[in-house]
Image: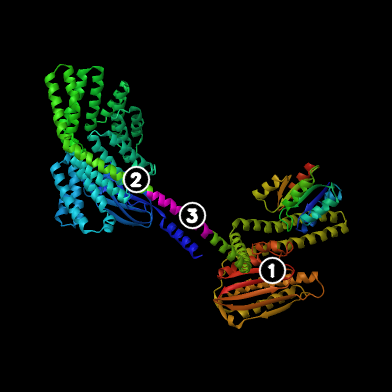
Amino acid sequence: MKKIFCIFSATLSFLLLHAQYKVQFIVKEKSAIHHDSIYITGTFNNWDSTANTNYLMHPHGVNEKSITLNLNAGPLRYKFTRGSWLSVEKQNYGDEVPDHIATITRDTIFTNSVERWRDQMFIDKWYALSAQPTDTDRVKILSSLAASYAFYTEYYNLDSALYYAQTALQLQQKIVASTDAKLWSQGGYSTQLTNLQEVVATLMHSLGNYPKALELRLENLKLAEKDKDKFNMIWAIASLTNDYAAMDDYQHVLSYGKILDSILHTLNIADTRFDEGRWASAKIISTAYYKLGRLDSALPYAIKMTKINGISFSEGRMGYAQNTLADIYSAMGERERAFAYYRSALSKGLDFLGASSNEGIARLFQKEGNIDSALIYARRALVFYQTQKQTVQSWGENNNTYVAEISPLIAELYKDIGQMDSAYKYLKLSVTLKDSLYNTDKMRQFQTLSFNEAGRRQQLEQQSIEAKKQYDNKVRTYGFITIIVGALIFSFILYRNNKNKQRVNVQLQTQKKELETTLGELKTTQSQLIQSEKMASLGELTAGIAHEIQNPLNFVNNFSEVNTELIEEMKSELAAGHYEDAVEIGNSISENEKKINHHGKRADAIVKGMLQHSRSSGGMKESTDINNLADEYLRLAYHGLRAKDKSFNANMKTDFDKNVGKVDVIPQDIGRAILNLITNAFYAVTAKKKQLANGYEPTVSVSTRKLDNMIELTVMDNGNGIPQKVVDKIFQPFFTTKPTGEGTGLGLSLSYDIIKAHGGQIKAETKENEGSKFIINLPA
Amino acid sequence: MKVLVVDDERDIQTLFEQRFRKEIKEKLMEFVFSFSGEEAIDYLNRHEHEAVLILSDINMPGMSGLELLGHIKQKYLKPPPLVMMLTAYGDAENYNAAMKMGADDFLTKPLEFSILKEKLKAIL
């Protein structure tokens, strides 16, 4: 039971915690530098704060962007960034403003201003360094500065980037030495180190130091595997394939590409955070197959590149995909397709990509023997690689590698047109560059690294096989234990159920009775409610008035018209000397006259009753002895009826509670209400007496009682009771059980209004053939 | 022509007898009276096909005039006696209900006997 309760309360708290609210974020750019891709990232609805999602914000106003998200209640950290989500994730790359911290408790709008983006970033960071930050913060700032110098083409500065990266790395090592392993993983130090090492690796790669770049990236891969951080694993692998590609080792590129693909397959396809990883994986595998000459295998991956088109995918990425496709088609000899894709890629207007497309077009022309055109395109690419060193390096690439690669093509083209000097010059350039890039030392370093890594991977695989074996054994053991425990629990439940059955039955009986009582009370309340509704219904009242007035009027009008005719007839009978006939007519006239009078009075009574209903009483509230009042009206009713009907008789019983005392009421109104109840009671007992001649004692009882804050007055009779089907209608105006013409049907209705006006309640309890009981409650 | 008048107002009998005293004397018309829906059905069961016209009030204790109308229209499918509704409720709701249920006419109280006589003459 306790366990069930725990589960229940856990579920409840889960539900309470996960109420969702609409949260609108508005960001204003104070520096008025309009930027069309501003993202928001934060701990949105995630259990794991590292699993951030970023959202592209939409235009909202002048220099304003906004987005509305459905977020769970609870704490939230968020921040705004510019550029792609890559810069969001890699926090030290410097593109972000500090986190905003908030707690969501309802629908909210957060408005934040951003002072500055990248443009003022350097100033900010130097300022932050001068403010003597903690070592951990200092590493962050230094890494960020290094990344800024390394990756932003417009600020590219290799020396500065290297300086800051090395300083950060040294400091980081100092921190690691002084921090124990647990803190290390908690503090996110490994992500920080990974980012830093990636910055340095990129710099090394762009300098052509591929072994160093590979070493650092392999280091990152180890860290990510240790932390089981798939995100970092993906990026470490994607980065290191670059180093293998630069070393022309596409066999390795392919095998890492496949590892990458298998990791991505374990992740939810709907998780768009990994879209860029998926794109990179397709690019890596496609390029590797292409370079290895396996064009049929390369093509589907290149097509896949064009199909991953998430929110953060630019036209540029489409351009790269098209360029890769064009390379493959070119190698396949599909000239038209290759041209079309190269042109599309060129139209994206991206310089680095453009160079690659120009090179591809040059090779196409060369194949066709159109050497002049080939030379024009090849030289365009070369000029870019030679003159735009900074741009190439800011892409994390080494320009010399590209120059070395395109030079033999140009040499060949010059040779074809007979310009041997130029051909020799480019051939020599290529050899010199390749010598420095791929000297024996470097090759050896690279191979050692690759060999060590292969050994490590083998070890890892062995470990994972053993771990799986152990896991299978565990599963088997636990499964067996679960079955035994399950059987035990089941038999215990059976035993306990049996034991509890009787006790539960008794409980059920009690509950049933309680429910029946509650249901009864509910029904009473419901019919009272319906009652009040009907009281207020004007339509009901109008129909009642129509019927009650029109019926007597019908007689008054018609009998008087008949009398007019009869008088004329009587006159002519008299004139004719038929005196007997005249007397007979005269008798009819007199009978009719009585009926006119009767129905006229009937109409009068109805109108007076209605007036009493509608007119607010002129009386004032007085402190009134309720017992005296009730006694007085009981006698009044009795003697009134006796005066009308000599044969009338009934027993009267009173039971007055002295504690009732005086209550503030309008005495004539309450008196009127009591009188109506008592008159009805006398009527009921008289009617029953007429049916049962002997042995029946007609009795009307009036009693009072003091309750908490209330007094209760009861009028009870032992008449025939009220039929169940009309009980709900008795307080309605014009409703009566008396024969037509004997009652106006306004008495109980009036009583109801009076008691309500005093803030009290009136209700009827009745049993057919046993009698009725009317209970009035008034506030004391 | 025998007319059955159904109304809980007992004075209706005197009124009809006075108003149609000439027609009754000349035996052009004969009136019978029931003071509730139940009584009317009882009469019709005992004297089937005698009354060619039924004049009924709507608002009566017990079986209402509309219930009586429904009963008559169900029971006397062929030939149906003419049924006129006679009521103090001259509202559209009752009028529509009565007409939907197959009433042949609808008169409101206070009754204009001159109009009623015209209608009866037309039937005769």
- Which sits in the foreground, B78 or A398? A398
Magenta-highlighted stretch: main secondary structure? helix
- Picture quadrant where residue A181 is located: bottom left
Q: In this image, B81 relative to A368: left or right?
A: right
Q: Position of residue A624 (x, y in %)?
A: 57, 79
Residue A142 visible in the picture: yes
CA distance for labels 3 and 2: 27 Å
Q: Which residues are magenta?
A: A466-486
Which amino acid type is shown beneath numbered disc 2? Answer: Glu
Q: Position of residue B5 (x, y in %)?
A: 79, 52
Label 2 crowding class (10 Å Cα cut-off): few <14, some 14-19, many 20+?
few
Label 1 crowding class (10 Å Cα cut-off): few <14, some 14-19, many 20+?
many
Which element is circle 3 on? helix
Residue A479's tag is 3
CA distance for labels 3 and 1: 67 Å
Residue A5 vs A400, above or below: the answer is below
Q: Give the number of the mark in front: 3 or 1.
A: 3
Sequence-first disc among 1 and 2: 2
Q: Chain of mark 3?
A: A
Q: Chain of mark 2?
A: A
| Both marks 1 and 2 on one chain | yes
- Which sits in the foreground, B51 or A698? A698
Residue A108 vs A262, above or below: the answer is below
Look at mark 1 in the image and give the residue it sits on: A766
- Which sits in the foreground, A271 or A364? A364
Residue A732's tag is none
Which amino acid type is shown beneath numbered disc 3? Answer: Gly
